[in-house]
Image (cartoon, rainbow, N blue to C red):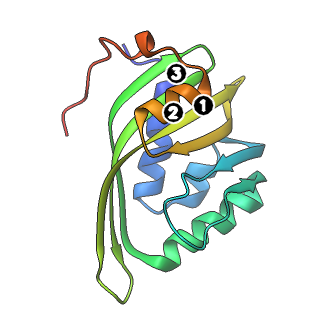
């Protein structure tokens, strides 16, 4: 059975993939902190609040013609949901494609996400977020 927090994170990804900013941001606390993974040049390392997330969103939408985020594993631990996902994007104008795996960790306060943190590897995410490796053992991967 899927937890409420995993459902919220999943709905956020669905909103992102539909390019529905309002649906995605409605799941975030007004004072959310959005930490990027440092993968793409030109993005700030941290964005604050709905306005900041909007600036991040706009930067991503302007750069990419296609952006798809397909989660393949969710792990809930304490007030966090770790999501492993496949990212696929196609550059606007250039047509350059990017395909990569990475991690988001969502920290919840009540029913809203208060922090979204991006990581390049599962090891980096676990260490930074204080999630024990045992928390992901046995967590099943979803079919792609």
Residue 6 located left or right of residue 116: left
| Quarter of the image that includes the C terminus | top left
Relative image position of residue 58 (x, y in whole percent): 60, 72
Residue at the extreme right of the image, as rendered: 31
Report the label total: 3
Residue 113 located left or right of residue 13: right
Q: From what the image shows, is residue 89 above or below residue 64?
A: above
Using the image, tell me which numbered label, if any, was put on residue 4: 3
| Mark 3 vs mark 1, CA separation in Å | 24 Å
Could you tell me which secondary element the residue under label 1 belongs to? Answer: helix
Could you tell me which secondary element the residue under label 3 belongs to? Answer: helix
| Mark 2 vs mark 1, CA separation in Å | 5 Å
- Provide the residue designation for mark 1: 128
Q: From what the image shows, is residue 94 above or below residue 15?
A: below
Q: From what the image shows, is residue 59 above or below residue 47?
A: below
- Which mark is in front, 3 or 2? 2
Residue drawn at 47 percent across, 52 percent down: 15
- Provide the residue designation for mark 2: 125
Relative image position of residue 67 (x, y in whole percent): 38, 64
- Which mark is in front, 3 or 1? 1
Query: Closest to the observer: 107 or 44?
Result: 44
């Amino acid at each position: 059975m899927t937890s409420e927090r995993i459902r919220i994170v999943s709905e956020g990804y669905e909103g992102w993939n539909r390019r529905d900013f309002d649906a995605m941001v409605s799941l975030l606390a007004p004072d959310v902190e959005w930490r990027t993974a440092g993968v793409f040049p030109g993005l700030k390392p941290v964005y604050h609040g709905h306005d900041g997330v909007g600036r991040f969103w706009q930067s991503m939408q302007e750069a990419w013609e296609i952006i798809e985020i397909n989660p393949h594993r969710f792990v809930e631990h304490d007030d966090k949901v770790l999501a492993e996902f496949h990212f696929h994007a196609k550059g606007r104008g250039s047509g350059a494609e990017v395909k990569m795996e990475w991690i988001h960790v969502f920290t919840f306060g009540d029913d809203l996400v208060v922090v979204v943190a991006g990581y390049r590897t599962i090891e980096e995410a676990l260490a930074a977020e204080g999630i024990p490796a045992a928390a992901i053992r046995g967590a099943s991967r979803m079919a792609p």
